[in-house]
Amino acid sequence: MALPQAKQDATEARIAALSLPEGGWAEPARREALARLRAMGLPNARDEYWKFTRPDTLVSAEAPAARVLETDETPLFDSRDRLKLVFVDGVFSAEESDDPSLEGVTIDRLAEAKDIHWAKDLYGVLEARGQDPVARPLAALNTAFATDGLLIHVTGKPSKPISLIYRHVSDTSDAILHHVIKVDAGAEATILENGPAAARFNKCMEVDLAEGGRLHHIRAQGRDHERRAATHVFARLEKESVFKSFTLSVNGAMTRNEVVVEFTGDDAVAHVAGACMGDGDFHHDDTVFVTHDAVNCESRQVFKKVLRNGATGVFQGKILVKPDAQKTDGYQISQSLLLDEDSQFLAKPELEIYADDVACSHGSTSGAIDEDGLFYLRARGVPRGTAEDLLTIAFIAEAVQEVEDESLQEDLVERVAGWLARRRG
Amino acid sequence: MAAFEDVTVKEGVDQETVDAVKSVGTYKHGWETDIEMEYAPKGLTPDIVRLISEKNEEPQWMTDWRLQAYERWLQKKEPDWAMVDYPEIDFQEQYYYARPKSMMEKPKSLDEVDPKLLETYEKLGIPLKEQMILAGVEGAEAMPADGRNSDRKVAVDAVFDSVSVGTTFQAELKKAGVIFCSISEAIREHPELVKKYLGSVVPVSDNFYATLNSAVFSDGSFVYVPPGVRCPMELSTYFRINAENTGQFERTLIIADKGSYVSYLEGCTAPQRDTAQLHAAVVEIIVEEDAEVKYSTVQNWYPGNEEGKGGIYNFVTKRADCRGDRAKVMWTQVETGSAVTWKYPSCILRGNESQGEFYSIAITNNHQQADTGTKMIHLGKDTRSRIVSKGISAGVAQNTYRGLVSMHPKAKNSRNYTQCDSLLIGDKCGAHTVPYIEVKNNSSRVEHEATTSKVDDDQLFYCRQRGMDEEEAVALVVNGFCRDVLQALPMEFAMEAQQLVAISLEGSVG
């Protein structure tokens, strides 16, 4: 079917502002992705999948400017032993990064890796699989035009987390990064991501987990107030593999995080969780799509949003259970805490189920701080502000607890507490 | 079920059991009435619209209203977002108007109605004789006499294809000030009310099917309950499609004025045919200050045969507008029939402290597809809504709950609770949940819960251990699963609904 003219024009305008990196093993995949993008067209406000989030600033030919936030806050994860890999406005910085050699993992740069074979089989492949049944044009755009990114092959159990640090220095940067992570059978790694990346950031991460592989993904999206981001994670899980992904978002003018999980092997586990704290001109959208196409897999989606001062939180989650994906255990919860009258929460928690021996459930709630809880704490001498903060942190906790490492949990909670303290300031 | 005819009854199995099993599982209302019909020519043109209007002896403003709707319909696209899949409908291959020849002269009273028509309704268990106390439930005669209140009366408006056959208890209702008649009669007799309210809840161009209905609706029911009146009896409309290749497009308008109360029941059946038939209805309810309307439906259109041949395509727009403060509306539906169901009875909670409730059981078996749910639009302060939806899917059927709960910024201190559960029987069917939740203020609370599961093995085992066969056990578990909704039904329907739950699932186990 031909695209509406306006959509086609907008898509071509965006394509014209970019150049497709030529040469190397990735070029065929990039060209295919460009064809996919042209067939789908970039999203606009009329698309059902973008009902709650206006995509215009994410798809415009030119990125809206975003000031860099001056802050004396210590970046998250700074105190831990990790392998630091730094991107400045979307460009890998070898000077600021550690030497990437670490036992149990090989790391290459997308912009430099000319003849990598393993990544060739994955680059754009999982993204393409994730285009059905719902189109994700921004991910296809990413595959076609990504200028940098990392190709991470986890072969064993690296001794420390691999930490991707994004720094935003130019008010007008428009970065497109594409990472590919392949976890071999029985291998296990932790990927940390933090920082605001760019004025506008389009990131795609493809994760392929072989039998028994495990990947922990913990991300904190930087708190630059004006930054915009559209991110995608595509994960494919083979037999008995485990994928756990948690995202903390603190501010940012516009964020759309899509996570697409596909179970292709039996007995695998995927947990996708997120917490966001939004204030003022803040729009945050978590869109998750989990496809169960194997037996006895477990998926969990836990999303919590704290919103104030006119902020908007969006959750679109779906569990699709294909025929024969028996014994599926699917769980999904999305909750929002609205700290004042002006904020809003928009949700579409979906189930689509074609197998009968399954237990799937979802819940969604929205409301203000519990007055009874508040009264209880105040009756015990806790000042109102502190009591509200305590209840807010307790509200976020269910999502943070999806992170396995307890010391990381503490760091994340501290971040939330800092956000609350600044609001009281 | 033909196999039962020559079955040898095993020793130890009494004939009663065989008969009981025989009676379930077949669509009971699949017979047709052999009656001479008068059709409008096939297809849809402005002339057909005018013809329908003329047949109903409508004033010019009504004809214009219809023609305007027709023009709007031409520009509309059939919606494709629902999870239903059916062959393209050729809207020019339908008859838009069919009435029994004997209805050409409007009967002045029920005594003049063609006995064949009366017989049809009698066979369906619908009492069209006023002296009969309620027998609206099949098998009611088997009920112990002391089991029901002998004063209970139900006024019935019976719609046969495109026309209303008759409305009972009109005189008695009139005494209370209640107007209950067919919509065509209301257009003639009470134009001021119709003009004021028709299309005010479901605008002419609301959606493809509502627009189509606005152009070609032929009959339906009209209810007006004046201020402060508690309607002395339950009102009921029974829709019967009989003619082949004929669409039924009924229009119902219910107005509950300040402080009034009415309970309205709706039932529907159709003969068994190989070709699919179209049914596109619009129901509008206006609830003023302190008024309350209960609207209950048992939808039992012909669902098509086991291979998915035939059946009714049911595209219905139902909406209630709680205009005044403390207005209350309650939708209860049991959806067991139709090949395709596309239906979202909704509530606009405009008045402060108004309340909307939606209770639904949707059962799909064989090749049936249902995409149904509700919209609760909270506009006023302190408004409350509750949604309980139970979807049951068997065979190769698809069952979708689709709903919207919207809390507008001004709907302070409002409350919604939604529970939708799906049950899958067999591994070829599907159950889906597509809720939209939009919360735009923080003093309101919205809670949504949904689960999907199969019939619990432990519960089945428990029942079977006590001597039930598997089918009986499943029916019992399913009835338990639906209990929340069944309890919300008026007594007349609860019985029938319980039986329907069992019937629709017959043959789905094993």
Image: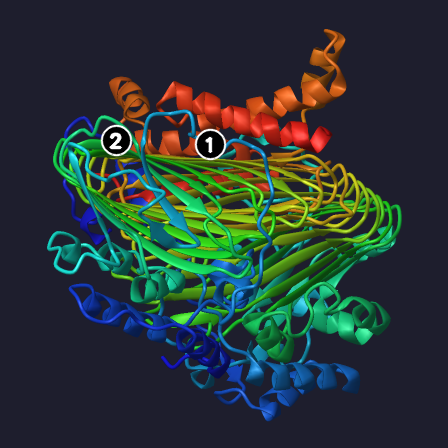
Q: In the current view of this chain or complex, which residue is farthest to the top?
A: A380
Q: Is residue B506 visible?
A: yes
Provide the residue designation for mark 2.
B470
Quick check: can you spot residue B272? no
Looking at the rendered structure, the secondary structure element under dot 2 is helix
Horizontally, residue A322 falls left or right of residue B43, namely left
Chain to which mark 2 belongs: B
Q: Are marks 2 and 1 on the same chain?
A: no
Q: Position of residue A57 (x, y in %)?
A: 55, 63
Q: Residue at x 75, y 69 (%)?
A: B198
Kindly identify the residue that appears in the image at 38 percent across and 65 percent down: A137
Task: Please identify the residue farthest to the bottom as the structure is shown.
Answer: B47
Q: As rendered, which of B504 and B435 lies closer to the eye? A: B435
Amino acid at pointer 1 = Leu
Mark in front: 2 vs 1: 1
The answer to whether A194 is drawn above or below residue A18 in the figure is: above
Q: Position of residue A355 (x, y in %)?
A: 27, 43
Q: Residue at x 51, y 49 (%)?
A: A285
Q: Is residue B497 left or right of residue B285?
A: left
Seen from the viewer's position, the closer of residues A203 and B268 is A203
Please give the residue where the numbered disc 1 appears in the rendered image. Answer: A76
Say which of B346 and A257 sits in front: A257
Quarter-wise, where is residue B164 in the image? bottom right
In the figure, B386 relative to A65: above or below? above
Mark 2, Cα crowd under 10 Å, few <14 / some 14-19 / many 20+, is some
Locate residue B205 relative to residue A146 in the image: left or right.
Answer: right
- Within 10 Å of disc 1 (Cα), the crowding (few <14, some 14-19, many 20+) is many
Q: Quadrant of the N terminus of chain A?
A: bottom left
